[in-house]
Each structure stands twice: as C-alpha cells, then as structure tokens.
Image: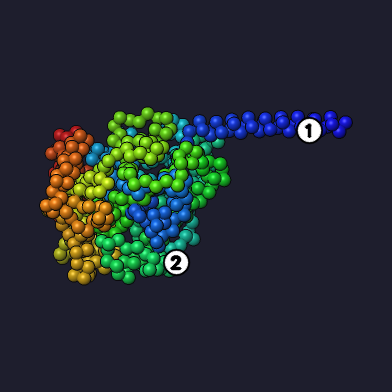
Amino acid sequence: MIVSDYRRALVLVILLAITFSCGRKERLEENVTRLPNILFAISDDQSYPYASAYGTSGVNTPAFDKVAKMGLLLNNAFVAAPQCSPSRAAILTGRNIWQLEEAGTHSSYFPKKFTVFTQLLEENGFHVGYTGKPWGPGNWKDAGWKKNPVGKAYHVKQDDSIPPSAISKTDYFENFKDFYSEKSDSTPFFFWFGAYEPHRPYQFASGFEAGKSAANTVIPDFLPNDSIVQKDVADYALEIEWFDQHLGKMLAYLEENGELENTIIVVTADNGMPFPYAKANLQEYGTHVPMAIAWANQWKGNRVSNELVSTIDLAPTFLDYTGIKIPTEMTGKSMKPLLEEGKAYRDFVLTGRERHTHARPDNLAYPARAVRTADYLYIRNFKPDRWPAGDPRPNGIDERLDEGFRTFGVGYADIDGSPTKTYMFENQEEVGDLFKLGFLKRPKEQLFHIKNDPHCLYDLAENSEYLEIRSELALKLDEQLLQQKDPRAMGNGDIFESYPRFAVMRNFSGFKERGAYNKAFVKERETSE
C-alpha cells in the first residue's frame, strides 16, 4: 500500500512537472512572439549630460540610470530642432523640420497631411495615449486633427500638494495607471510620458533648499559660475529629478504587472536646457540630449554607445520592431543595427531651427541649419544680420504699460526669462565673451571641434587649419538640404516667415497678428505649394 501510494505520488509529481514545463514553454514563446509595448518618456528642456548615468554630479536620476543599465546608454543623441514643438513634430513624423511646413516652426499648425507613427500604431491595434505635454505648443485642431497627433490625453489626475510651486501639478504616474487600466491584457500599448519639467519657470533656490549645493552643481563653461547661476542650475536639476521620479514609478508598475521586460523604453528630451546659448540654439547644449533605450527581452544591457543618433530615427525604429511598414517619406533610419549589434548606422546628424518666439520685427525667424559628425559641428546661419537670441528690447518701451511685453524683460526673447539671463544682461562687462556667445550676432558659418570644445566656445570657421573641414561639412550640408528639398536651400526659404504663430505676440514693429499668415510672404507660399 505504501509503495502504491508512493508511485501514485511520483506520477502526480511528474505530470505536474510536465504541465508546468509546457506552460512555461508556451509563456516563453508567447513572450517572444508578442508585440512589444512602448513607453516613451520625454522631458521638456534637458541637455546632455544632465543625468547621473553620465557621471554628472548634482542630479540624481535612478530611473533613467535603470533604463540605461537594462539596455543602452547613448552619449551622442540629438534632436532635430532646439525648440519643443518642431522637435516633437520631427519625432512623430520621422522627418526633419524643413520637411514639415508649418510644423517645422514653433507654435504654428501641424498639417494633417503628415503621417505620425502614433496613428500607425493605433491603426495596427495598439492602445495609444499620453499624459503631460504632447506635441505643442501649436494648433492641431484647426489643422484637421480630431485629437493631438500624439494620441488620447490622460490628464484627469492632479496633485495640488506637489512641491515646489513651479512644478506641474499633473500626476503623471496616476494618469499612466488610468491609461493602462483601459487596455485588455493582450493589447500592446504605446504611452507618451511628456513631463513639463524641467521647463521654466523654477522656484528660485528650490534646489539648494532641497539639499543641493554649489560644490556639486555642474555649470557649463558658456555660463558664468556665479552664485545666482549655480542656484538656477540646481533648480533645473531638481526638476529633472521630478521627471525621473514619475518614470521610476511607471517602471515599477510595469514590473509588478509583468510588462517591464517586453516594453521598449526610451527616455530622452525634446531640446536643451533653458539657458543662454543652449535652448533655441544649434550649438551643442541646444540639440544634444540624454537618451537611454531598453527592451530587456531582446537587447543586451549594460551597454554604452558613442554612435550618433537622431530623434527622427525613433519613429522608424518603433515601426520596425512592431512589424509596421515604414513610410517612404520618413527621413529617419531604424536604429536596429545599433540596438542589436552595436553597429553605427549613420555618420552624421542634421539639425535646424526657424522662428522660436516673436522676438524680432515682422515676426521673423532666425533660420539656421547644422551638421554634426563625431568630431565637428558645422552651423550655417542664413540671416547673420539678425539677432540670434532675438532683438534687444526696443528703446522707449515701458513694460509696465505694454501688455505685449509682459514676458519681454530685457529683450533677446528667444532666451527664456531667468535669473541667469538677467544676471548676464546686467553684468555684460564682467561676463565678457560669454555674453557675446549667448546674446550677440553671429557669422554666416561657424565650426566647432566638439571633442576639444564640447561647450562651443571657440569658432574655427575662419581658422586656416580647418578650412578644408569647413568646406567638406558645408558641402555635405548643402547636398542633404537639397536632397530633402529644404526651402532655405531651394531659394524660397522665406516661406517660413509666412507661417502663423499662435502663442503670445509682442509689440514689435511690422507684422504681429496672432494666428494669421504673414501676407507679405503668402504669394511665395502659394507658389511653393
């Protein structure tokens, strides 16, 4: 009887083992064949190397660092434009800003005719949504979209207890949970976590109040190392950490739900830090952003790459890994060779800018294009007679009496208002060449040796030793812009001046009608179309 019972028990154990093994095999096969989820986390105004995975002191980003450890940390990732709405449009379409008409400038329309990867994912069964900042600022409704080009909004959850006062009250994590709760177990998702941080304004000295100090705050060499600037940069770092905290909660939630390893996770920014000579500039700290990317089920972790990456490559990469045909009009390239084998897939990236704010008479742009290689950055400023940071404040304007100048301050309006900007303006002689870099006019061509000069302090364009390199990069830029039919290279670049602006307009002379096309350039615009 005892032997018989033992045999029955043994048979039961074997059957259970077989059942478990088969079930495990089926789950593993399902895990491999299932479409991946995608979590795209994008901060607002964060420059490389402000994340602790890069070894930068004064900023602690454990969630970003976790993604980097799970997958790949990128040292050379670049946005298509140093401003939020054109940069985000380029991400969504996989195209450069000069290929996007109104969407290639700041706070204009997003033409409905352009294909966005989020729409393709949704059409192919993905649950798509966002919280925080999607594409914007700008007008998508009147351009024919039924919802923001990113997807459905999840904004309901707010937290009024959030400190400090300048940080958004949007509870990103709770909104992500709402989004997640609406999908079925078998449905893959794409979620856009668009933090408003570290966009200005900041609560001044909030970083120091939270325990940061001058000793561990990293000040770029193009900014004066003054106590005001130190506090301002520490405030910026504190807001990066807020973005990272919500990302950490999302990663933990995905892990709890068994989704983390089958989720492609990308963490990056839309443009550089909101300081002089960074955001709205094609110099390094305007376009060079942090990026970590992981898919634990498929790609090796603990890797670091110095290869060049553009954010216009994200759209074709997402489509490539979800089995959706990549539209031929996408200029970006799939990152698959880099992600799977660590191989280079491009040897340069292109960047560009048009109008940022209303910072000049007639609402004119400061058009510029650039090519960045592993070693050099070449910039072409198409209108060197214009002020790159916006015109100085016109004489005779009383800000107290003119509502149009409520955000104008000292002028140079393409630089966000900040304690650092005010300090540099009020101490121009003391900060010397740093003021010139950030505020004053620039030559038609600029060249920087990035490996020797990562902060773009020394323009080598007229240095005889670098004339051959300048010529080679100028030719490469010309070839690419002509191939992509950039209006600035095709002889009808002023079409960009016609595009409306829907954000605040200032009381400059000339054209200043909010939301309207500039009629002086409409004829050229119609001819171009």
User: Which residue, given by chain and number where applicable, does mark 2 sit on?
Assistant: 210
Dots 2, 1 in contact, CB < 8 A: no
Figure disc tally: 2
Q: At 27% across and 55% down in the image, what residue appears?
A: 454
- The answer to whether any part of residue 361 appears in the image is no
Cα distance between the residues tagged 2 and 1: 62 Å
Vertical placement of residue 1 versus 270, above or below? above
Residue 416 quadrant: bottom left
Quadrant placement of the C terminus = top left
List the residue tagged with mark 1.
Answer: 9
Q: Quadrant of residue 103?
A: top left
Q: Position of residue 365 (x, y in %)?
A: 19, 49
Q: Residue at x 46, y 34 (%)?
A: 126
Instruction: Mark 2 or mark 1: name the one nearer the start of the chain.
Output: 1
Colour treatment of the image: rainbow
Q: Position of residue 260 (x, y in %)?
A: 51, 43
Q: Amino acid at mark 2?
A: Ala
SS class, disc 1: helix
The answer, for residue 434, to whether it is visible in the render is yes
Q: Nearer the viewer, residue 229 or 130?
A: 229
Q: Nearer the viewer, mark 2 or mark 1?
A: 1
- Circle 1: residue type: Ala
The x, y position of residue 37, in whole percent, is 47, 38
Give above or below for 111 relative to 246. Answer: above
Residue plotted at (57% across, 45% down): 256
x 26%, y 68%: residue? 423
Residue 434 found in image quarter: bottom left
Give the secondary structure at mark 2.
Answer: loop
| Along the viewing direction, whichever of 432 and 204 lies nearer the viewer | 432
Residue 299 coordinates in the image, percent (x, y): 45, 39
